[in-house]
Image: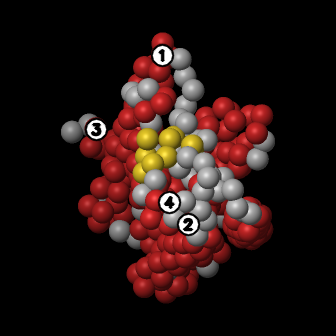
Amino acid sequence: MDNLTFRNSILLVEGLKVTHQSSYPVFIVLFLAYIFAMVSNITLIFLISTEKNLHDPMHFLFCNLPVNDILGTTVIIPRLLQDMLRETSERYISYVECVIQAYFVHVYSAACHYVLMIMAFDRYVAICNPLRYTTIMTNKMVVKLSASAWGLTVLMVTIMFALTVRLSHCRSTIENPFCDNPSLFKLSCENVSINNVFGLVYTVIIACVTVVSIFITYVKIATLCIRNKNKALNSKAIKTCSTHLTVYLIMFVSGAVFIFLHRVPEYSESRKLGSIMFHIVPPGLNPLVYGLQTKEIRHKIFKVWCR
């Protein structure tokens, strides 16, 4: 197969295996979950951008999270809903579209980690160095942290896909509800050891770096809280940190289940469901956990509802 044919080839997306009777209930559930995630995340961004008393480093850094959640849901759910209304044999996608979708699927996955890392750094500075917070967390620093998170994400995902698109392929079925990097390089009959190793090593490294950095951050915050006798400060620290930690655990558990099932062939259907949940659960729960647990945002939401 020559290179031109390879680039313009049409792929068949396996999609979700649901019966005809259950396809409509599943469609409705996914559609409502998508609408809820979009509305709640867009609302948070709107509130933070329009309310002047929310114009601080913590909330600006937090904006990276709903932006990423919108990306994560939009990149797969509309296409998935469209495929559910088609016959299994008609769920076609071009190779180029598949690569684009897979690319942003991994941008979302990686950005989840980096965004939560910079948010943890902000909380560390605010709690452990409150007197220096305004001098450290300037607008310039916020921009640098955000740019670093997204820049590193784009760089690493681009390298990952450069290793994948170089491959020819001898298969045309995406064994997943949507396109991702493993599904793409599994189309090839060439040696994909490099792709497997790079993907696995990169996943392990980013997970370990995130876990270790957030763990160290919270150990330092916890140590300060134990030594500090200020109950009001400790209560605020515990509340903000527990919110951030809850968001991280939701993302980490959802991603870990998906990654584990991707490497256990006998649980292929569970893997498909897990991969979809990774793009539905965190974007849907993050606004509830972070938005409603943050006093300033919660008051603004209630004020809008009561008008």
Query: Which numbered circle lies on residue 20?
Result: 1
Q: Amino acid at mark 2?
A: Val
Instruction: Give the mark nearest the N terminus, 1 or 3.
Output: 1
Which residue has dot 2 on it? 165
Callout 3, which amino acid? Trp
Q: Position of residue 165 (x, y in %)?
A: 55, 66
12 lies left or right of 194 = left
Screen quadrant of the C terminus: top left
Can I make out residue 270 in this image?
yes
| 185, 140: nearer the viewer | 185
- The mark found on residue 305 in the picture is 3
CA distance for labels 1 and 4: 33 Å
Q: Confirm or deny contact between disc 3 and disc 4 (CB under 8 A).
A: no
Query: What residue occupies the far top of the structure in this picture?
Result: 21
Give the mark, 3 or 4, whose residue is nearer the N terminus.
4
Q: In this rendering, would 24 be left or right of 218?
A: left
Q: Position of residue 35 (x, y in %)?
A: 36, 37
Q: Residues within 10 Å of mark 3 (few under 14, many from 20)?
A: few
Residue on which the image places disc 4: 6
